[in-house]
Amino acid sequence: MQATLKGKTIFITGASRGIGKAIGLRAARDGANIVIAAKTADPNPKLPGTIYSAKEEIEAAGGRALACIVDVRFEEQIQDAVKQAVSAFGGIDILVNNASAISLTGTAETPLKRFDLMHGINTRGTFACSQACLPYLAKSTNAHILNISPPLNMEARWFAPHVAYTMAKFGMSMCVLGMAEELRSQRIAVNALWPKTVIATAAVQNLLGGDASIRGSRKPDIMSDAAYAILTRASSEFTGNFCIDEVVMREAGLEDLSAYAMTPGMPDSELFPDYFL
């Protein structure tokens, strides 16, 4: 019998757009319950999508959805969203820590306010959401935590240009390393997923090169399909892994990844590689 996410409740941070929303949409096609935990409640011309528009899309795709205003820097907002999720759907089976802040700036150019924002959302937010969901994940028959974070590549070249961001992003990955072993006996899987190439998101459009970067990117669908492949595996058998989207899809039997390219026909070799690989 093929694994499915039907009836599973998935708590996704930063799910109003981009990779988080794509993961929610893929799970919704199975009939999953999606908790959209994100900050954007009002439309922003520079950042398309709100928790409410994401809710509409997820429900149209076949899932049930709950829109929660959550800034993961604030514990009470996380706790409130978790309570709403449990009240609406009866529990939580999967947590996807996707919310993230980025600033590719050097030491002198990174205001401490921005440093605190990245660490508060990336590292602390991931830890806080994991902690809040744990009592409910422990009751699930196939519990997963999936962090959208990179392999722990401790080369100076990944720290020197933007040490504050790298520290904050690697903090998410350190949660994977530690929690996977800590929670192994409870059969709660903890894994990371990171893209081989740049993914076409609002952050790329606005902060990381604009239209040129988008042309050399892949669609968020490759991350959502890879996440689906991970989240449908037995949590007792697959934990503590730092997965790369392209590798996951090839292992799942998909050799031709051309459909994911934003520019039709662009060879894989010409796509822009992501950081930390």
Image (tube, rainbow, N blue to C red):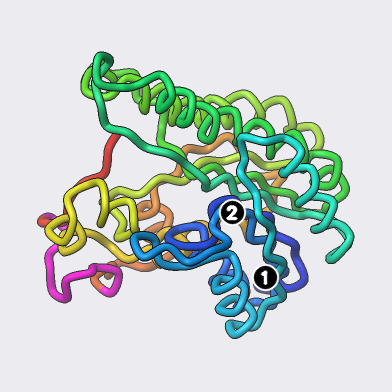
Q: Is residue 177 left or right of residue 226?
A: right
Picture residue at 58% right of the left edge, 65% below the top: 51
Looking at the rendered image, the quarter that the C terminus falls into is: top left
Q: Is residue 112 left or right of residue 24?
A: left
Classify mark 1: helix, strand or loop. Answer: loop
Picture residue at 69% right of the left edge, 58% below the top: 68
Picture residue at 65% right of the left edge, 44% below the top: 145
Q: Position of residue 276 (x, y in %)?
A: 30, 33
Crowding near pointer 1: few (<14 within 10 Å), some, many (20+)? some
Q: Position of residue 153 (x, y in %)?
A: 35, 25
Q: Position of residue 49 (x, y in %)?
A: 47, 67
Q: Main secondary structure of the magenta part?
A: loop
User: Which sits earlier in the primary sequence, circle 1 or circle 2?
Assistant: 1
Q: Is residue 161 above or below residue 9?
A: above
Which mark is drawn over residue 55? none
At label 1, the amino acid type is Thr
Classify mark 2: helix, strand or loop. Answer: strand
Q: Is residue 109 left or right of residue 95?
A: left
Crowding near pointer 2: few (<14 within 10 Å), some, many (20+)? many
Asked whether residue 213 is drawn in magenta, I would say no
At label 2, the amino acid type is Ala
User: Which of the pair 223/13 is nearer the observer?
Assistant: 13
Q: Is residue 46 above or below residue 115?
A: below
Which mark is drawn over residue 4? 1
Mark 2 — residue?
A: 38
Q: Give the extent of the magenta segment.
A: 259-269
User: Which of the pair 84/43 is nearer the observer?
Assistant: 43
User: Which of the pair 108/194 is nearer the observer?
Assistant: 108
Q: Position of residue 78 (x, y in %)?
A: 72, 43
